[in-house]
Image (cartoon, grey):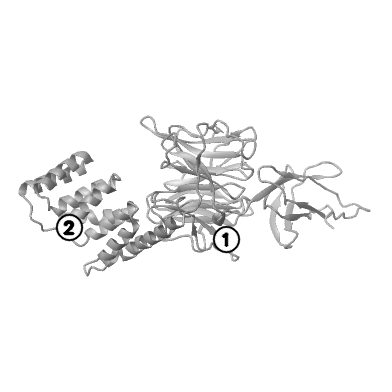
């Protein structure tokens, strides 16, 4: 937000000042402007240095130089120029630029003071009042967060996963042992995004050497953010500028063909995709709700999280903005719906935070809406951009991408860390099995209901496919009843416990249904 506000004002004000300066200084200043139009920033700074040397109080040149240094991340140099302008009793709006740069430098108390000084000026532009107030709120939040830091110890995922290129946008299977991510090769004249995969035997075991996914998923075109379903059967992903696309970027699905390869992608259609930018999908653990982001472009200042629900015909319904308190007039990006289906993690610059994009979590409310987001805190969040966070099935292990940590192998690396207690999700467990005819062994496709025994609440309804196989993700540390009422078969009910079941191993429960015949009786195994 502050970058857009900063750039929107500064260029329009360079010619508005009436300050004594020599003709030679003005000539250098104009040459600097010409150099910028040619993207010759080094030359532009050299011309500005000459203009300032000739006329030390030349506010236009000082502000222009500060802007260029701010762009390249040299906040110390930019602040030096702003302070010179203020010492010379320069224009009132310098306080705005000064406050924004102080915030970027992490000098939050001074930023509040400078921004308030701008707001108190009778010449302050009311158009920017809301954005400036948000920057003040962010500064106050940053001060409070730094005073109460949360535990944080990120670990690089190692050279078997990360390369000297870019790794980002991870997703993970329900057992926590398969990690798919986007790998971007920046070498050559054309960059290439593909999906890679790494696996491990169990929680705590080392990750295997990452390799590209096999089949028809990766192409010569770019494959962007993706999400793998809990059972590893489908990958939803974003792809841009394809012939069958509806907008600039669309969401597609590719199916695991059972031999480790992936099918040709299928566009999810215009119920999900729009004529603009749709990207960064995340799929619920039951496979029935797709979350993603939508904006006019990836650079749009107003990007929101949408969702679409799976219909009975196997297609997703019309996408809608998620209800509740998550979406703002700013950017909400990289959503991740945890396996507990109650915790939504995302990045945002529209809620009070440390900087450009912070990590947040929102909890599902009883009415299905999403509650007030909680910032994951400092030092997890910084003054930079935090994005592409996912959380493992255990509810406490996070994975994310960063280029800001010192132990990186390349341009962007994947890291893991343990989330603070306050922002963890519910640990889950998963159950799988096969439903068959007890007498013939024939597979049965049917509806399966799971009920929490203690609360007597029906938690989930799943279906076994034509193969008879089923897969379900349930909150861990609880006891359940599995119930099946299939046409032509006796009612089936069985209790089972996930109290000690961990997420990295499946609880297996095969079901044999008894055909209804004269003399057969229902056997209730949970009574």
- Taking the spot 28% from the left edge, 44% from the top edge, the residue there is 72
Q: Nearer the viewer, residue 107 or 362?
A: 107
Residue at the spot x=21%, y=44% of the render?
Answer: 37
Residue at which label 1 appears: 364
**Marks 2 and 1, the one that precedes in the sequence:** 2
Residues under numbered marks 2 and 1 in contact, where contact means CB atoms less than 8 Å apart: no
The answer, for residue 129, to whether it is visible in the render is: yes
Residue 25: % across, % down: 9, 47
The answer to whether residue 121 is above or below residue 81 is: below
For label 1, the SS is: loop
Q: Against 261, is 369 above or below?
A: below
Q: Dot 1 surroundings within 10 Å: few (below 14), some, or many (20 or more)?
A: some
Percent across and percent down for residue 268 are 53, 47
User: Picture coordinates of residue 64 (x, y %)?
Assistant: 20, 50
Estimate the spatial distance between the alpha carbons at disc 2 and disc 1, rounded to whole Å.
52 Å
Q: Secondary structure at mark 2?
A: helix
> Could you tell whether 231 is left or right of 15 in the image?
right
Q: Which residue is tagged 2?
A: 87
Q: Quadrant of the C terminus?
A: bottom right
Report the mark closest to the observer, 2 or 1.
2
> Which sits in the foreground, 479 or 301?
479
Residue that protrudes farthest toward the left in the picture:
23
Q: Neighbour class for label 2 at 10 Å: few (<14), some, many (≥20)?
A: few
Q: Is residue 209 left or right of 19 when viewed as pictured?
A: right
Q: Position of residue 185 (x, y in %)?
A: 43, 33
Camera-side residue: 336 or 161? 161
Q: Which mark identifies residue 125?
A: none
Q: Residue furthest right?
A: 519
């Amino acid at each position: 937000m502050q970058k857009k506000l900063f750039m929107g004002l500064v260029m329009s004000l360079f010619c508005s000042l009436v300050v004594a300066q020599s003709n030679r200084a003005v000539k250098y200043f104009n040459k600097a402007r010409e150099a910028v139009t040619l993207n010759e920033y080094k030359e532009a700074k050299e011309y500005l240095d000459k203009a300032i040397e000739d006329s030390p109080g030349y506010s236009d040149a000082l502000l222009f130089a500060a802007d260029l240094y701010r762009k390249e991340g040299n906040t110390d140099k930019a602040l030096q120029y702003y302070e010179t302008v203020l010492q010379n009793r320069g224009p009132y709006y310098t306080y705005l630029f000064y406050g924004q740069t102080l915030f970027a430098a992490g000098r939050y108390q001074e930023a509040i003071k400078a921004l308030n000084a701008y707001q108190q000026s009778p010449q302050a532009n009311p158009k920017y009042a809301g954005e400036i107030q948000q920057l003040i709120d962010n500064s106050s939040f940053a001060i409070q967060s730094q005073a109460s830091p949360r535990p944080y110890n990120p670990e690089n995922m190692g050279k078997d996963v990360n390369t000297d290129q870019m790794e980002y946008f991870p997703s993970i299977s329900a057992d926590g042992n398969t990690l798919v991510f986007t790998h971007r090769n920046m070498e050559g004249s054309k960059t290439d995004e593909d999906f890679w995969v790494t696996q491990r035997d169990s929680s705590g075991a080392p990750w295997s050497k990452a390799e590209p996914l096999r089949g028809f998923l990766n192409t010569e075109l770019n494959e962007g953010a993706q999400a793998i379903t809990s059972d590893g059967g489908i990958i939803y992903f974003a792809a841009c500028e394809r012939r069958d696309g509806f907008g600039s970027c669309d969401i597609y699905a590719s199916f695991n063909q059972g031999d480790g390869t992936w099918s040709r992608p299928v566009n999810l259609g215009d119920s999900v995709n729009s004529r603009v930018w749709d990207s960064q999908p995340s799929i619920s653990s039951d496979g029935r709700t797709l979350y993603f982001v939508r904006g006019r472009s990836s650079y749009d200042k107003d990007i929101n999280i949408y969702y679409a629900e799976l219909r009975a015909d196997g297609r997703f319904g019309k996408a809608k903005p998620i209800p509740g308190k998550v979406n703002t007039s700013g950017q909400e990006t990289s959503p991740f719906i945890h396996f507990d289906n109650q915790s939504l993690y995302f990045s945002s610059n529209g809620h009070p935070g440390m900087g450009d994009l912070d990590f947040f979590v929102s909890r599902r409310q009883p009415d299905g809406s999403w509650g007030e987001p909680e910032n994951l805190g400092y030092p997890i969040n910084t003054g930079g951009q935090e994005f592409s966070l996912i959380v493992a099935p255990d509810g406490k292990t996070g994975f994310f991408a960063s280029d800001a940590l010192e132990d990186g192998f390349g341009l962007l690396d994947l890291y893991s860390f343990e989330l603070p207690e306050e922002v963890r999700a519910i640990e889950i467990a998963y159950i799988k099995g096969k439903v068959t005819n007890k007498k013939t062994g024939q597979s049965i496709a049917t509806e399966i209901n799971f009920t929490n025994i203690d609360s007597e609440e029906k938690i989930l309804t799943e279906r076994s496919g034509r193969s008879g196989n089923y897969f379900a993700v349930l909150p861990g540390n609880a006891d359940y009843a599995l119930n099946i009422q299939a046409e032509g078969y006796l009612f089936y009910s069985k209790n089972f416990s996930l109290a000690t079941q961990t997420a990295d191993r499946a609880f297996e429960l095969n079901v044999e249904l008894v055909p209804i015949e004269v003399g057969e009786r229902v056997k209730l195994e949970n009574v």
